[in-house]
Every structure is written in C-alpha cells, then in structure tokens.
Amino acid sequence: MGHGILRIVAAVVICFVTRTFAKPADPALNKILVVLNSLDQQTEFSHFLDSLEKRGFDLTIKAASDNSASLVAWEELAFNNLLLLADATSGALFTPAKVIDFVNRGGNVLIAASSQVSETIRDISIELSADFDEKGNSVFDSFNSPVKGKSDIISATKFAGEHIIIPPTLQGQISRGELPLLFRGVGHRLTGKNPLIMPVLVGNPTSFSYLDSTKGNAAPLTSGSLVGSSLVLISAFQARNNARVVFSGSVDLFKNEFVEAIIGDKTTANGRFANELTKWAFQEKDVLKVVKTFHHRLLENQQHGSYRIKEELLYEIELSAYYDDAWHPYASSSPIQFTATMLDPYIRQNMTLSSKVTDTTSIYTLPFLTPDVYGVFTFQVEHKRREGYSWIDEKEVVSIHPFRHDEYPRFLSAAFPYYANVFSIMAGFVVLSGVVNNSGNSGNGGGRNYSGDNSNQARLQSRTEYGGSRNVGRADNNYRENNTNYRDNSNSYNGAGGSKWAQAANAVETGRINRYDGWENVNSEEENYRIPHILANQHQR
C-alpha cells in the first residue's frame, strides 16, 4: 500500500510539472516531427509527449517506415524540430544526409538510442563527432545500480563541464543522490574533431560499456573500451547557425517506465531531466537575442553610416535572454567583445555592462576612437560561449573617411622642425643682407678719403676706376671707354693750362694701369694687344 501511495504522489508531481512548462522562444518554431519504431509506442512515451503538447508544441508522430513526411518541402523547413525515438529502426525519412541538411537549415534534433542502436543513428552521430558504441553493447555499473540484479540500469550522477543545459539546482540534487536519474542504454565517445559538441552527462568512475549479452558479469575490458568519464551518456551540439542537437544513449530515459519509477522512497528525476533537456534542444531556454545595435558620436545621439578617422564613437548593443517563459536582461559572466575589422581587426575590446537596464534587456557599451585608417569597416559583436547559450554574431558595415580639407589643424606638431627651419632661413637672410649693405657703404667706395684741391682728381680717378671695373674682352670697348674718359677730362679741365693737361693724362694713364692690374682671367695675347693700343691712343691725344 505504501508503494501505491508513492505512485499516486509521483503522478501528481508529474502532472504539476507538465503544466508549468515554458513556451518556445519563437512561437512560430513549434512544429515537432516525432519518429518512433512503430505507432504502438506512443503509450510508452505518453508522459513525455503530453508535456511537449502542453508546452505549446504541435506534434506530428510518424513511424520510421513511413515515408509520407518530409523534413524539407519546397526548400523550406516543414518542421522546426525532429525528435528521433526510433532507436533500432532505419528508414528513408531520416537518412544521415537529410538530417544533416535539416540541421544546416536551422532545425533542432534530439536523438535517443539504445543498445540496439541502428547504423543510421551511428552514421548521423559520427558526422557530428559523437561515436556510439557497437550494436549489442550496454552501459553497466554494479556499484551504482538502484535495481538489484540489473546492473544495466544505472543511476547517473556525474555531469561534465560547466554548462547551463541542466539547471544547477537539479544537477546538485542528482549528483547528491536526492533524485536518482535512471539510465539504460549505450554509451558513446566524442572524437574531438568538432569543437562545438560537449558532454552533458558522463559515466561514473565504475561505469563501463560492454556486450549486453554478458549482463555485466566478468566482462573482459580492452584498452579501447569506454570506461568512466570517457563514457559519455548524453552530449549536446550547437551549430554555428544556433541549431541544436542532443544525443542520448538511452531512449528508456524518456519512457513512462523510468519517469514513474520509485527508487526506495524517492521519485526519479527523469521527468524533470527530460523536460530541461528538451527545453534547451528545442530553443525554449538559454536563447540570446540582439534587440538592437546603436553607434554614434560621443556628443551626438544620431547614428551615421560614415565617420571620420580618429573620431570618438560610442557603440551600444542591447541583449535579452529567454528562460522561464519570458525575456530577461542578459548579464554575461564572460567578456563580450567588440571588433572593428577591415581585413584585419583594428579594434578588439571588451564591452561593459551599462547601468541602463530595462525589465527585458541589458545594454553593453564601448567608447572607442576610430582607427587612423580610412576604408570600409565591419563593426562586429561575436559572442560564442560553450556553456549552452545561443551564439551572437552581429555585423554592420560602416565607412570611415579621412579629414576634409578644412578639418586639418592649422599647424601640425610633427612639422615643427620644418617650421623652425623656414624661419631660421628667413632670419639668416635678413642678417646677411644687413651685413653686406653695411660693409659696401662704409668709407665712400673702398675706404678712400678725398678732400681739398685733389677733389677733381679724385673724381676723375673714381670715374676712371669705375670704367675699369667692367670686364670687357674686346679692344673696341676699351677704345670707346678711353674716348669717353678723355672727353670727360677735356670738359673738366678746359683752360686749365698745359700742366692740367699733363695731370689729366697722368691720371688717365694711372687709371688705365690700375684697371689693367685688376683684370682677371685674361691671357697673354690679350695683354700684349691692349697695353700698346692704350698707350698709342694716349700719345695721339
């Protein structure tokens, strides 16, 4: 009678749990294709299937041998989710190529296997780096079997990694044994070729996988056998397009047999565990959404598609997380990075959580200075965590242009040495000009001082020297200059007497000789020609 009361209590708890489930984050994504070995198995999964319907999903149940349904129709997804509970049957409905194409288009998949796992399921799982054990193998654990004499029914208690697929409270209750989680089926290993898959539930240290026919009695283990934590019971995969896939080695975990089971005086955790697992798989929780992005200059509130180099901007992104049947502000425990790239990243910085938090969204901000390189940049926020949240990859193309001609500064600090050079040259030119002018005007023509009676002679000699300062190369020029000097002397000293004529002739001769002494760059033939010619002209006069 005690067991009967416990069964009634368990049924009440199951009904309560099934009526308080969340709804899909996107109500349009609520179509599930359920594939069973045969339609007669519906009663075996009645609790599980009823819970899905109460959560707002539209179920279509098909047998594995039924080819009337299709995952993709007219290049569109006919169903958003695939629940594959046909553990031992192969069919044309879920070939590996069709399932992989379904995932690439954004569909979610949950696959449950058993010790009679089909080759189709093994081929699908190996494509995503999950390698199920050979058909006929089962997981055994004689030290953690809640049912005596049935070591193939184990109580799984060990979770792997830090993930949020299963709530921490439920994980703690299962790990401490407060709520036993029954598992019967096949194990698998993760090959490591795909980093996007992660283990959720692994075997206990005393668990191993071997032939089901041995019933776990004296089973010889080899080096390649799955043992302990290398024996993965349940794993989860999240693709880059946020499609989710779950591999479970036990189809019995979802059956009424294990959901309603009573272990001692405890109800099992299979019902709650299955609900949380399918919530994650079918996008009912841990879904991140970008509400909006906004970037603008610091002193403005208007977004632009083009900015100037070396300009201060503020980038904002508004995020929400879906869980508990509602959208909530998202507070990340790991940094959210902003990147500005043009072929290569020029800016990569962590954003900070703003105090502007609403009931449904949180805002992350980053003030930054645009690069000193103009071109077409991509502002990107890529937030990919391995713990179970959906991934964020938000991109926006923005152009950055150089300064306009009237935006450059009047003086450039880098050009100060050149400015100093120009002004120093100008100052040197002024100083040099003053020195040259002062030296040329001092002493009235070379420092000679003439006064008194000799003023006329000095004036004559000065004019003669001026005529001799010309650098002329022909005798005709010399002749014309001599005539000019002679006429000047004649006009100046007319009527002065023979003595003045003699003085003038001597002055002319003296000026000619002095001019001859000052010539440069003349050859000997010119000298021999010019001296007699000058003397002859003087004697003629």
Image (cartoon, rainbow, N blue to C red):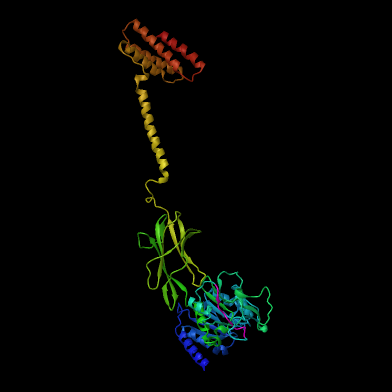
- State whether residue 311 appears in this view: yes
**455 relative to 140, above or below:** above
Residue at image location 38% in from the left, 35% down from the top: 426
What range is drawn magenta here?
Answer: 150-160
Percent coordinates x, y for residue 183 in the rendering = 58, 82
At a point 40% along the width and 61% down the height, the residue shown is: 314
Q: In this orientation, which residue lies closer to the viewer: 522 or 63?
A: 63
Residue 213 vertical position relative to residue 159 in the rendered view, above or below: below
In this view of the protein, can residue 491 be seen by the observer?
no
On the rendered image, what quadrant is the C terminus found in? top left
Q: Where in the figure is residue 80, as x and y percent of width and height?
A: 51, 79
User: How many numbered tags mark residues here?
Assistant: 0
**In which quarter of the view is residue 456 placed?**
top left
> Which residue shows up at 55% across the image and 70% down it?
196
Left or right, 433 with respect to 61, comes to left
- Position in image of residue 40 (x %, y %): 57, 90
| 17 or 327: nearer the viewer | 17
Q: Is residue 528 left or right of 124 when viewed as pictured?
A: left
Q: For this rendering, which residue is in front, 401 or 536? A: 401
User: What residue appears at the point 46 percent right and 57 percent down from the top-left corner?
Assistant: 375
- Residue lying farthest to the top in this orientation: 498
Q: Please state the horizontal and vertical placement of residue 34, each as a whole percent of the image.
A: 54, 83
- By secondary structure, the bulk of the magenta-drawn segment is best described as loop
Asked if residue 152 is among those painted magenta in the image, a careful observer would answer: yes
Whether the magenta-drawn stretch holds residue 209 is answered as no
